[in-house]
């Protein structure tokens, strides 16, 4: 009789052990799925994330997902020097392009020339 009860206990213990393995797997899958959904949501809403956390701009750019909050870009940029009446001038020409389908107001722009030390000239 003792042999049967020991066998029953071992079988019950093995069933509990197997059940604990199965319980952990769905939890791990659920956690992985939640993490994946969070990452997809962050990528999809990266403009909103950058509005609230501006320092994340460099993070998104580092992984190849740049964020442009103004929806404008500079195109066809040309830089040249001219001398007129003995004064040398730096000429910067280009086009500001809207990258969305709707009109966007161009903000006030300020340009500055800087030397090698980063000081405005």
Image: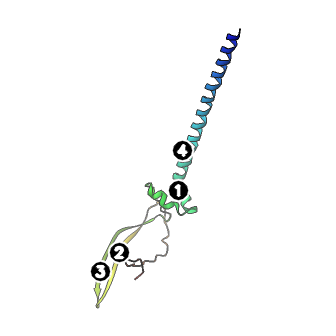
Question: Residue 46, which numbered label?
Answer: 1
Mark before the other along the chain sequence, 1 or 4 = 4
Q: CA distance from mark 1 to mark 4?
A: 15 Å
2 and 1 marks in contact (CB < 8 Å):
no
Q: CA distance from mark 3 to mark 1?
A: 39 Å
Name which quarter of the figure residue 30 lies in. Answer: top right
Residue visible at 52% across and 60% down?
56
> Which residue is the extreme one toward the front?
2
Marks 4, 3: nearer the viewer: 4
Residue visible at 63% across and 22% down?
14
Say if 31 sits above or below 84 in the image.
above
- Residue sitting nearer the eye, 31 or 71: 31
Label 4 packing within 10 angstroms: few (<14), some (14-19), many (20+): few
Q: CA distance from mark 3 to mark 2?
A: 11 Å
Badge 2 is on which residue? 93
Query: Of helix, strand and loop, which one carries label 4?
Result: helix
Query: Of helix, strand and loop, which one carries label 2?
Result: strand
Counting labels gives 4
Is residue 11 shown left or right of residue 103? Answer: right
Badge 4 is on which residue? 36
């Amino acid at each position: 009789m003792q042999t049967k009860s020991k066998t029953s206990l071992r079988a019950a213990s093995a069933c509990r052990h197997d059940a604990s393995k199965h319980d952990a797997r769905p939890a791990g899958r659920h956690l992985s799925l939640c993490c994946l959904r969070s990452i997809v949501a962050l990528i999809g809403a990266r403009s909103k994330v950058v509005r609230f956390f501006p320092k994340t701009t460099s993070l998104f750019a580092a992984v190849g997902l740049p964020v442009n909050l103004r929806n404008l870009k500079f195109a066809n940029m040309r830089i040249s020097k001219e001398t007129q009446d003995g004064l040398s001038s730096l000429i910067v020409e280009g086009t500001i392009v809207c990258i969305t389908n709707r009109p966007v107001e161009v903000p006030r722009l300020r340009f500055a020339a800087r030397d090698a030390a980063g000081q405005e000239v």
